[in-house]
Image (cartoon, helix red, strand yellow):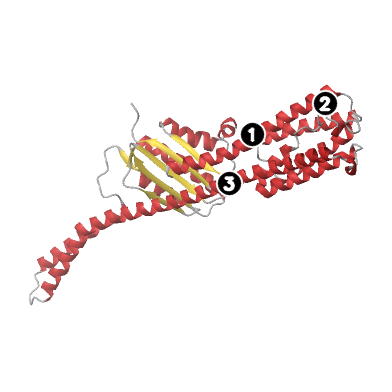
Amino acid sequence: MPDGGTRVTDRSHASRAGLARGALVFRWVALAWMSTIALGGGDFRRPVLAWASLLAALVWTVWISVRRGRENRGELAIDLALCGWLLLASGLVVPEDGVIRGRPFFATGYPVSAALAWGIAFGVRGGLLAGAVLGCGLIASRPLNGVPLGALEAPEIQNMMGAVVNYIAAGGAVGLVSRLLANSERAVRETTEALMNEREKAARLAERETMARQIHDSVLQSLSLVHKRGRELATSPDVPAAEVEKLADVAARQEKDLRALILRPPEDIPQGKGSLRQALENLRDREVVPIDVTVVGSIWLDGHRLQEASAAVKQALDNVIEHADATKINIFAEEDAGTVTITVRDDGKGFNFDARRFESEQKAGISRSMKGRIEDLGGRMRIETAPGEGTEVEFRVPVEDES
């Protein structure tokens, strides 16, 4: 994969994750402020209900922190329901008329967290919907606090509607940012995949052109000679056996050369080295999922380096076959500036990859069989994946030991 595309995709993932982290920080700050108000007030009409609501918000915030932006639809619904309840509870627990008499609001800004979470998860529509639900809860807190809506004065109505607009605007704005990031990520992924495909096509064309030149310089010229000399002999009344044998020898030599050209790299194998192309193609012997191997040029590695790199690629293929439900696998390898890059890409179901979690759980396939092997060679491994988007594993290995 082109490095520029990789960096853009990584930034897109990081931006959305940063958005979720920012919403989580806001949630904790709002919870701390709500707790401060509760501890400093103390004149609740229903203290048990107030403290129970505060405890529920604390427990839920801890749970959301553990999930770290991976909440499912059910959890997001619970989040919205809890935040809506905190708005209603504000009208039930503070003294009557307390919600409009300048007293700090019991729920403070904590309910905004639900609008932010829905905006991040569902985009603009989700954020607006959550904001509207919270706005309804805020309006309903007035009658629950003994303040009929019809009795509200103009400044009180303005304050209430301003808060409702804030809920809706917060959800909609964050939803818009989240949707823009998602669209950007999708566009970058599609562009990168298209570039990867074009790069593979260019590599295949270059390889075919090289082979075509070699065939033209040797096989085709010999065949032309056989054709010309064969016609001359066909018109001759006396065909010497030695001449026919000579043509047969020429054809046999070219057949041998052509087979060698097709089946293996044409140049001599460097002493003590092995062909990366051959090693990668050998991994298709136990093929369960169709595997396409593209290697740019001839790449030679010493025995140990070739064995360890091939073992890491084999483990990546085993992971795809066992877990990914993929229909195809692409292996792409090239050498540039003394570094060999091997990319294993599949169209499977992908997964949530967290490098620290995989390290802490000591996932043998990734940590030792893949990452450990490559790092022992002085290289590095990168994994890019997401649920439903396939997986790309990239190995970068120096051709020679760094001195």
Please state which amino acid type lies under the numbered disc 1: Gly
Marks counted in the figure total 3
State whether residue 92 is above or below residue 32.
below
Badge 2 or badge 1: first in the primary sequence = 1
Which mark is drawn over residue 180? 3
Q: Position of residue 402 (x, y in %)?
A: 35, 28
Badge 3 vs badge 1, beta-carbon distance below 8 Å: no
Residue at the disc numbered 2 = 38
Q: CA distance from mark 2 to mark 1?
A: 24 Å
Q: Residue furthest top?
A: 40
Q: Secondary structure at mark 2?
A: helix
Q: Residues within 10 Å of mark 3 (few under 14, many from 20)?
A: some
The crowd level at tag 2 (other Cα within 10 Å; few <14, some 14-19, many 20+) is many
Q: Which residue lies most toward the front here?
A: 154
Q: Indicate the quadrant where residue 226 lies.
A: bottom left
Q: Position of residue 326 (x, y in %)?
A: 54, 52
Choose between 238 and 3: the one closer to the eye: 3
- Please, what is the three-letter code of the amino acid marked with disc 3? Leu
- Determine which residue is flagged by label 1: 22
Q: Amino acid at mark 2?
A: Ala
Give x and y (percent) for residue 87.
82, 37
**Which residue is found at the position 10% from the left and 65% from the top?**
242
